[in-house]
Structure formats: structure tokens, C-alpha cells
Amino acid sequence: MGSTSAENTGDTPANGVGRRDLIKRSAALGLISVPTASFLSACASGGGNDGSGENEGETSESNPFGVKEGSKLDVVIFKGGYGDDYAKAWEAAFKKKWGVTSVHTGTQEITGKLQPRFNAGNPPDIVDDSGAQQIPIDVLHKNGQLLDLAEVLDAPSVDDPGKKVRDMLIPGTLDAGMQEGKVVALNYIYTVWGLWYSGKLFREKGWEAPRTWDDFLAVCKDAKSQGIGGLAHQGKYPYYINVAIMDLIAKKGGLDAMKAIDNLDPRAFVGSDAAQEAIEAVYEVVEKGYLMPGTNGLTHNESQTRWNQYKAAFVTSGSWLENEQLKQTPADFDMKFLPMPLLPGSALPFEAIRAGSGEPFIIPSKARNLPAAKEFMRMMLSKEWSTVFAKEANSLTILKDGVDANVRLRPGTQSTVEASRAAGDNTFRYLYTEWYSEMGTAIENASNELMARRIQPKEWLKRAQTAVDKQAKDPASKKNRRD
């Protein structure tokens, strides 16, 4: 991960998130927001924030933002794989410390509930802007509706007031929340993306976890011969199949192939050998009938549940999958994470994984209780609150050394820890999904057509490149750049 304005200190590789500290701590990996299902038109800025002054208290060393006792905090949490119990625990702790009562909303309908409020100039104070109905961060930013989080990140850390909040975070994890050089979203959870399988099913069938794409296809072929789908594709949310496509591009072509996409290169897709080989490899799964039957018409939950029922060998997802599927996963399923298998001649090793921060929390610029919202976010980045999150949500956060050693993780999440150790510094992370939501949606739509056999790989490359070229014409895109 990275942009020209992002910090790159310590052991952070220029191309990705620094990992040695995380590995030393055996840090677990958490989930990411499920990306936007469709691009939203710009939310109109509404009226003013007339009530802000009434929520301003006296500032001090221990109260840097001037939280006012007796005020109210409007909190909206995406109630997805993590649930929202962790946030309720945070809110109880916040009330105990500051005397601020939270109005809590847990929902998956982020756009439906919040877009009218943003339009009216009456947004919540702090939002977990995630899920299939996420309001795109770039849209909110372009309309001046997000607070620059520099004041929070430069405030004294709760755990060590001698250090800034930003100094307590895993290096590189702020990059995903940057727009035009400013951090406007705090991606709170550390995430990996890749393939997932059942250890139990693989043992029963005598399959080995594949390290090459040919071996992956061989497992899919054997699965098909036994009446089992090879790959479960979350057809109604093509973001998920792009996990495979984009991982294959990055691992085949190396970091330059990944950066070409983020940097809107005129040869990002058309003219890229890595992109061509990747999309042809994924289409081979379609052509040979290795997709789980009916998978193109399913939501992510429906497709993943059938995978939990042993109706497919593999599914693509991020490391929120285990939490999201807790109720549907058999006790002996033995969920396992797998880095994307390699195409021949790949530039990156098999162990390389897409990894970085996810689950963006935002503070609207027109929030009525900005002092409390800033303090709430500062406390999110304390060891106490990070540990609460780990216990409730089976994941770690972007806070270095942020979780008590007695916290135990479930098998699937633990397997991502092992993958993280094996990857070392071989991590990569796309940023176009955060920078350019319209472009991301166009590529997802092309992938949906491809998986349904309505277009061929050549047309997919053409549509993806068209989306890149269109985005490159936006003058604002010149402010987002990876080196």
C-alpha cells in the first residue's frame, strides 16, 4: 500500500503494509468491509451544523477535544460479520468515562438510512461505513462531507500520551483511508483476502491445498466429478470474484502490475500480459464448468452457506468470512485460508497475500457532536477498546500490540495468522477500490458478465481499461499516486 503522501517508516515496505511487528506479535487478521455494490451519485450537502456549539466542553490534557458531559453521541455501525456488540461495549465504556449517552444504530442498510441524513445536513456523529450498501468514501470526500482525521491521529495516545495516536498504529494501515493526501476514513481492522476451503472436506477427499493454478483446477475437476462445485462465486456481488482476478494479476505481474491499475495506466489492462493471463485463468473455471451450479444468482451469504454445506471446494473472500458464517459453519468444518495459487512464471511467491486495513470508520464534517466523535475514535485506538473488539469480533485491529495475550481466535482467523507469518513482507494492497468507486464498480460489472459467459476475456479487458481511462480524465485523480 502507499501513496506519495503516505508515511513509510520503519519496516514498512514501499509497496505494502509493514508486517514484521505484526508477525512478532502473532497478530490476528480481521475483516473488511464488503465493497460497494453500486456507485452512488454524489450526496448533496445540506444545511448547517447549528447544534455543534452546545456540545463543546473545556479542553485539557486528558480531554483534548473538549468532550462535554451530558451530551449525546449518534453512532451508526454496520451490523455485518462483526455484529455490533463490540460497539455497544465501547459505548457503555464511553458513557462511564465521559458521561456521554450514545444513540446506537446497528444496520446493514447504510445507504438507505444515511444518505437522506447526509443530504439533509444531519448526519450521525460517527459511522462504520461498510457493507454492500456502503456509501463510497470518495463520493463523501468529494462533497466535503468527511472530517479530515489529522486532528485525531495527531492527538496524544490514550495508552501513551507521550506519543501521537498515529504512532501507535501498524505502519501503512492509514493508506486505505486516504483521499487526495488526507486521511478521511479510519480503516480499523487488519484483513487478508484470498481463497478459503474446508480442512475436513479436503482430508476426506484426499485433496491437498493447491499452490499453483493448475493444481487448483485439478481439485475443481475432481470435485466436479464427485458432484461438488469447484468454486462458489458470490454472483450478486462480483467484488468477490475480483479477489481472485486482482490477486492473480498482482502475483503474476508483480507490484508494478498492481500499481499500474491504481495509477490509471493506459496499459493497466489492455496491453498487460499479467491481466490477460489472470482473466483467462479465471474464465477457464467458467468454461470447464467448475463453478458451483447456480452460484451466479446467489448473494454472498447464500453462496457461502452452500460452501459451508460442502457444495463447493473453494470460495473467495476476505478474512471477515469466518465471523460472517458463524451460524452456518459446522463445528468440524475446519475453515482454512489459502493464498491465491500461482500462474506459471509469477513474479510474487505463492505465500504473497493481499493484506491491509479495512472496515472504514468516518466522522462526518457536519456531525453535531464533533468533540465526542473525535474522542470516541481516539479511544477506539486504545488497547482496552482494541481488546474488546478482538473478544467480541474475533479479529485484531490496526493498533500495534493492541490486544491482550489471553484473547483466543477461531480456526479460520488463526489460519490467516499463519498465512501472515509465511508471507512476511510479501504483501500487497490495491487502493483503486477506495480511491475510485465508480471505476471499481465498472470492473465488477464486467466480471459479473464474464462469470455468466455473456462476455469473453478480451471484452473484459476492454471494459476494465475503459473504466481506467474514464477515471484518468478526472483532474482529482492526479492527486492520488503510488510510487
Image (tube, rainbow, N blue to C red):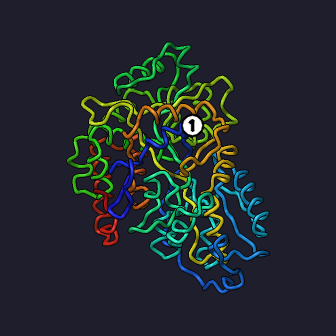
Q: Position of residue 42 (x, y in %)?
A: 49, 72
Residue at image location 69% in from the left, 43% down from the top: 391
Residue at image location 43% in from the left, 20% down from the top: 219
Residue at image location 46% in from the left, 31% down from the top: 338
Pointer 1 local density, CA inside 10 Å: few below 14, some 14–19, many at least 20: many
Whether residue 49 sits left or right of residue 351 in the image: it is right
Q: Nearer the viewer, residue 103 or 35?
A: 103
Residue 94 lies, with reference to residue 397, above or below; the image says below
Q: Which residue is situated farthest in the front direction here?
A: 162
Q: Nearer the viewer, residue 106 or 6?
A: 6
Q: Which residue is situated farthest in the left direction here?
A: 271
The residue indicated by pointer 1 is 303
Residue 62, by quadrant, is bottom right
The answer, for residue 108, to whether it is visible in the render is yes
Say how many tags the image has.
1
Residue 327, by quadrant, is top right
Q: Amino acid at mark 1?
A: Ser
Q: Position of residue 1 (x, y in %)?
A: 38, 52
Q: Position of residue 204 (x, y in %)?
A: 56, 14
Which quarter of the rendered picture does the C terminus lie within?
bottom left
The answer, for residue 146, to whether it is visible in the render is no
Residue at image location 63% in from the left, 35% down from the top: 409
Q: Position of residue 440 (x, y in %)?
A: 41, 55
- Tell me the element at label 1: helix
Q: Nearer the viewer, residue 408 or 234?
A: 408
